[in-house]
Image (cartoon, grey):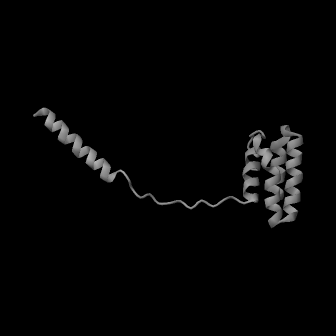
Amino acid sequence: MRTYKWFLAGTILFGTMTLTGCSNKPAYDVKPQGGIEQARKILDGYAKGNPPGSEQMSFPEIVEDVRKADAGKAQTLEQGFAAISRNPRNAASQAKDLLKKL
């Protein structure tokens, strides 16, 4: 008799979980960041003291993306990224200056 009650309780629990387990969650629409937004995010990290890392490999792609929208800002960004790559120890001050120009 005791086994039957546990079996019945397990069956009810399993049935409840099966019926309610899959819920429809709302889909989130994620928009890709543009070049300026990517550059500002990276530069903001540098300005806060984060050292330059592997994201430097994406600098040319970011510059080209910005160039499609604004050639002047792309030139400024290209020069700023080059300066940061040459002297990563001064990345924080260079990033702050570059953020002001963007």
Indicate whether 78 appears above or below 3: below
47 or 57, which lies in front?
A: 57
| Res 50 seen here | yes
The residue positioned 35% from the left and 50% from the top of the image is 21
Where does the image place residue 3, in percent across and percent down from the top left? 15, 33
Task: From the viewer's perspective, tell me whether residue 83 is left or right of residue 58.
Answer: right
Query: Residue drawn at (22%, 46%), measured in percent from left and top?
Result: 12
Residue at horizontal 32%, vertical 53%? Answer: 20
Along the line of sight, the residue nearer the viewer: 88 or 2: 2
Q: Quadrant of residue 6?
A: top left
Image position, residue 78 (x, y; %): 87, 54
Q: Is residue 99 visible?
A: no
Name the foreground residue: 16 vs 43.
Answer: 16
From the viewer's perspective, is residue 2 above or below residue 18?
A: above
Q: Is residue 4 above or below residue 60?
A: above
Q: Quadrant of the C terminus?
A: bottom right
Going 18% across and 42% down the picture, which residue do you hit? 8
x, y (%) of residue 35?
Answer: 76, 58
Horizontal side of residue 75 vs 35, given as left or right: right
